[in-house]
Amino acid sequence: MKFFTCAWSTFVEEFKDNLTCPGSLKKELAKDAVTYNVKYWVRAYFTSRCKSWVVDNNMSGSFNSWIDECRFLPVIRMCDGIRLKMMAKWVESETQVCCWNSDFSPKCMDLFESSRYLAIDCRVFFNGDDRYEVVEGQDRHLVNVSHYYHKDTYIASYRTKLQPIRGKKFWDTISSHYNLHQLLTYVGDLIRKGLELRKQRDGGKIQHLATKEVSQLHLICLNKLDLKD
């Protein structure tokens, strides 16, 4: 149990105190423990993304249940259904963000307030930005609220809107098609210029067969396009 007390330390100084506390760990066990990288087994060294006691990977299950009515449709209809749901979801989420009473997520602030009220002996001081100073006796900590929970970040994530799409009979596929002849000519010119530069760089020691093969391939592509037209 003393080993888990060290592993569950919430900050680095607490971990060092638990590790060096008399009777906390046997000398041999302490030596074996520190041979492993503390970033992988001490909670104090974890990033802010993984400090919870339990981590559930339910993102896939939530998404699958959310698109349940579209999952068994053909691929094109399924993607179109997901697009419509995402379009409506973004509008709903942005509307909710605009109704926030503070600059941070309400769920984040509720968690912070509940933790603050649990710490009766602690005094909390707010600097007016995104940092809090928590004092308990001689201990003093700084609590930072991540910018990922800020209102501006949420609004920025929904700034790019999904555009509606007209029906298939309104699609214009004639006036906006690419000029493949011009494209292939441009690609062929780039290949020839690249071969010329390589020839100059290598002092003329380049296989002429490569240039011949590229030219033949370019002519074959043009001939096939002429046959299709």
Image (cartoon, helix red, strand yellow):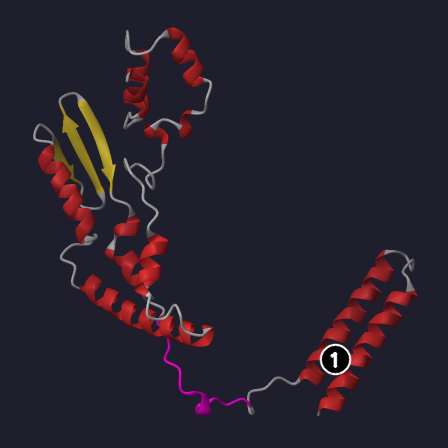
Instruction: Identify the residue under disc 1.
Output: 185
Residue range in magenta is 161-173
**121 or 71, nearer to the observer:** 71
Residue 180 picture location, percent across and down: 68, 83
Query: Which quarter of the picture shows residue 39?
Result: top left
Task: From this view, report whether residue 122 is shown above or below residue 181.
Answer: above
Task: From this view, report whether residue 11 is shown above or below residue 83.
Answer: above
Q: Residue furthest front?
A: 72
Left or right: 36 as drawn, with respect to 157: right
Left or right: 72 as drawn, with respect to 218: left
- Circle 1 SS class: helix
Look at 7% across and 31% down and name the residue there: 120
Residue 65 picture location, percent across and down: 31, 61
Look at 16% across and 54% down and name the residue there: 102
Look at 84% across and 66% down and name the residue there: 196
**Residue type (three-letter) at the residue carrying disc 1:** Thr
**135 or 35, nearer to the observer:** 35
**168 or 115, nearer to the observer:** 168
- 163 falls in the magenta region: yes
Circle 1 Cα neighbour tier, 10 Å, few/some/many (<14 / 14–19 / ≥20): some
Left or right: 229 as drawn, with respect to 216: left
Image quadrant where one finds the N terminus: top left
- 74 falls in the magenta region: no
